[in-house]
Image (spheres, grey):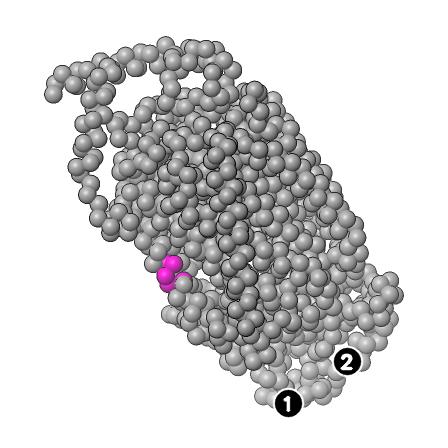
Amino acid sequence: MATASVATHDAAHDHHDHEHHDNFVTKYIFSTDHKMIAKQYLVSGIFWAVIGGFLSILFRLQLGFPDLNLEFLRPLLGGWIDEAGKLDPTFYLALVTMHGTIMVFFVLTAGLSGTFSNFLIPLQIGARDMASGFMNMLSYWLFFISGVIMFISLFIKTGPAGGGWVVYPPLSALEQAIPGSGLGMTLWLVAMTFFIASSLMGGINYITTVINLRTKGMSFSRLPLTIWAFFLTAVIGLLSFPVLFSAALLLVFDRSFGTSFYLSDIYIGGEALPNTGGSPVLYQHLFWFLGHPEVYIVLLPALGITSEVIATNSRKPIFGYKAMIISMLGITILSFIVWAHHMFVSGMNPFLGSIFMFLTLIIAVPSAVKVFNYLTTLWRGNLIFTPAMLFSIGLVSFFISGGLTGIFLGNSAIDIQLHDTYFVVAHFHLVMGSASFFGMLAGVYHWFPKMFGRMMDARLGYVHFWLTFVGVYMVFFPMHYIGIAGFPRRYYSWTNFEFSNMYTDLNMFVSAAAIITFASQFIFVFNFFYSMYRGRKATQNPWRSNTLEWTTPIEPGHGNWPGEIPTVYRWPYDYSKPGAAEDFIPQTVPLSATPESNLPHEQEQVKLEMEIMKEESEALAANESKH
Amino acid sequence: MYGFLIAVGVLLLLSIIWMVYRIQSLVSVVKGSDKKIASGSNKVNAILFVLFLLGTGILMFWYSIKEFHNYQLPIASEHGVVTDRLFWITMAITGVVFIITHILLFIFPYKYQYKEDRKATFYPDNNKLEIIWTAVPGVVLAGLVISGWMAWSDITAPAPENAHVIEVMGYQFAWDIRYAGKDNVLGDHDYRLITPTNAAGVDFSDKNAVDDFPSPVVVIPKGEPVLFKIRARDVLHSVFAPHMRLKMDAVPGMPTRFWFVPTKTTAEMREELGNPDFNYEIACTEICGRGHNGMRKVIEVVEPEAYRKWFAEQQTFLQSNPALAAGYEAEVQELAEVQ
């Protein structure tokens, strides 16, 4: 049997070498290889994260240092800085809008899901590539087009869209209401259309691949939690993004073709518009039907990555593997029926508010289960603090801090006061923004060796982590106080009101912390690009992990495994199993090879496993003799 | 010149950091510490977690206590007392969870940091534990939901019949106030009737509109229910009166409402806060364009007697501008004159 498998190895290897002569364009640009597409997503994600972060620094300058002369930004912002050296208020709103759009969609959806779903799904389930490589390539390039359009909109004369990232009509429908609702909004809608198409293509691919292309033995109950997370994320995206598309489409009709889906009884710019019968609240329902699941689209992959990283670096199985899956399933289903908690005071029927309050607080239960399971996984572990592990622990901290404030906001009675204040800003930046961002960074640090065959520098990683972790808390924790005090969101300045004419010192502190945090991200950017070329060479399994991707060559080629795809015999979390010599047993090690560490129920499976292996080797031998 | 010096300084700093980085990575290669599973950094990181816990914990308690009177706005409405109580109950429960989970989250890394001679405990699941920590949050949340739901139902219930009706209309970028007048019924409105002199588009052919009157300030009586009928004429706005714990979107084409009972007059609040300039305010909390942060309206809460006196003194729309009745039936014009 051994000889037979070696022979097939070689044959397969030759086969692969001969078939793929990649030139620069097919290898680096129009690649259909999932690993290259993942890297394209990652680099695009980093690019957008820098842009999105930079925009936030611009408006934090205004909020923290309202008297600062911003003349020095004129070379960049031109007319958006007025003669007195002040930022233009409509451009401030545009900055807020673009920061949100870019971070939510381009960084945390495309940059996170796009990168890690693409990279890890085939590698961790044991597949040669995605189900459709071509569609996968198309998905990236549609995202790219979307990005180009959004980028262009930053530079047009009337400015980019400025109605907040939720772009509620009528503000976003009427050019008279705000200059950003002109060409900027049109470009926003076109860009989002491409983006939705891109994420649907990606999602279909992820789902199909996970269902159909798992290697032998890789049952759903042996999938790493990362894959479960990516799978469920793709399902959520597939079901909710089309609704955003319909919302956007109706908005396009209202803007350009004179319909009244969202418009009614409007008098603006000295004239009464002919539109009647529409409802702005309809848009909010449609938008949040994506908007809320979107929170989980960005969060679940991060939680999946964290599960994997924490288990590996605690040298312990993730606690409650099944409970983790069940809670993710619960979150997936519930995420579709809580959307209107963003609309408690939108004027919708208060009875609906009651229903959505009940449903919303239910979703806190699976989230709480996940936190307790992470804590128990750390308990009595043997913890190795790789940068990825640090970021994962940081994620759990943000998930707790931001998750708990969700209990306030999900309660409609308490939400009356807190809605659209800085309390909300603090809440979602912690639970969705920073947590997902940390998940993404953890993923990069953890799988960098698999992506580029080299290690990132750990010490720079530590510095990056501590600056960012402390920085994020210094930025977002004070916002709770500001929010409880009632400071509204999306305000250019608060000095017009007596109740909010305070906390200039705290806002200055927040802005300073934001600038430091943003600056420290360049440590990561440096580490990333430097290590790509000059980092220490990686070993095959640097974290001594169980999952399949670490059985590939250090730099896997097209098709991932040179020979046959390995078979899977166990779940991915056999860390520190009693009786085993090492503190990890990869998924490819048969149970029959580890009699010393098998649990009683596994001992029973050994017999079955032996039978299957015997049948297979017979079939293989028969196949060989035919040739 | 300064720019040049700063650039040189930054360059120097960067090159020093660069050299330190190179030296330490070479040293670690020589020492072979990069081959180890967990280097000395492991301990440093473990300690940093504990320091982080202590440092931020102290900072949080210190600031929360020191600033309490600043961020806790005084309450001036009946339902505000209820929602604030819910807020602080939730704060107590989540606060305890927050602190306990964070102590565990940051102590575990210290306590269970990597040791070569130790093996982690193989502890893949425990159904009893899972059930406990599904059920306990479930029960606690159910309690919060039910108390929140009861408060919400009361707040959003129909306003009492004797509530003083006031229309609050948002537009770019201000609020327009209309009182329902003696009959306490607002006259119809139609956005097509809006003119520079009739900003709210009041339909004066409706008899109910005859006694409606405007006011630059929202004057309301203490201890009596007030009903805000809210609408917008251009884009979304949101009425936010922070001291009243009141917030409701103003939606073009879809009237909304919010009723409440103010509990302290402006004068009482001024005395309580020791701030003679204090005013209750309305702000806008739904992004509405360039002037979003400037939509201020003052609410003046007065004693009921003072309110009635003020109310009787007000001039209706038609009294202050009889031309508004032009073009309508003679009956309306007569009514306007009779008043």
Image quadrant occupied by the N terminus of chain A: top left
Q: Is residue A347 above or below residue B234?
A: above
Provide the residue designation for mark 2: B314
Q: What is the chain identity of the residue bearing mark 1? A: B
Residue at the spot x=43%, y=58% of the render? A247
**Would you say residue A337 sits in the magenta stretch?**
no
Q: Residues within 10 Å of mark 1 (few under 14, many from 20)?
A: few
What is the x, y in percent for residue A457? 47, 42
Choose between B184 and B275: the one closer to the eye.
Answer: B275
Q: Which mark is residue A36?
A: none
- In the picture provided, is B161 more to the left or to the right than A193? right
Residue at the spot x=35%, y=49% of the render? A40
Provide the residue designation for mark 1: B323
What is the x, y in percent for residue A581? 47, 16
Q: CA distance from mark 2 to mark 1?
A: 18 Å
Residue at the spot x=62%, y=71% of the render? A68
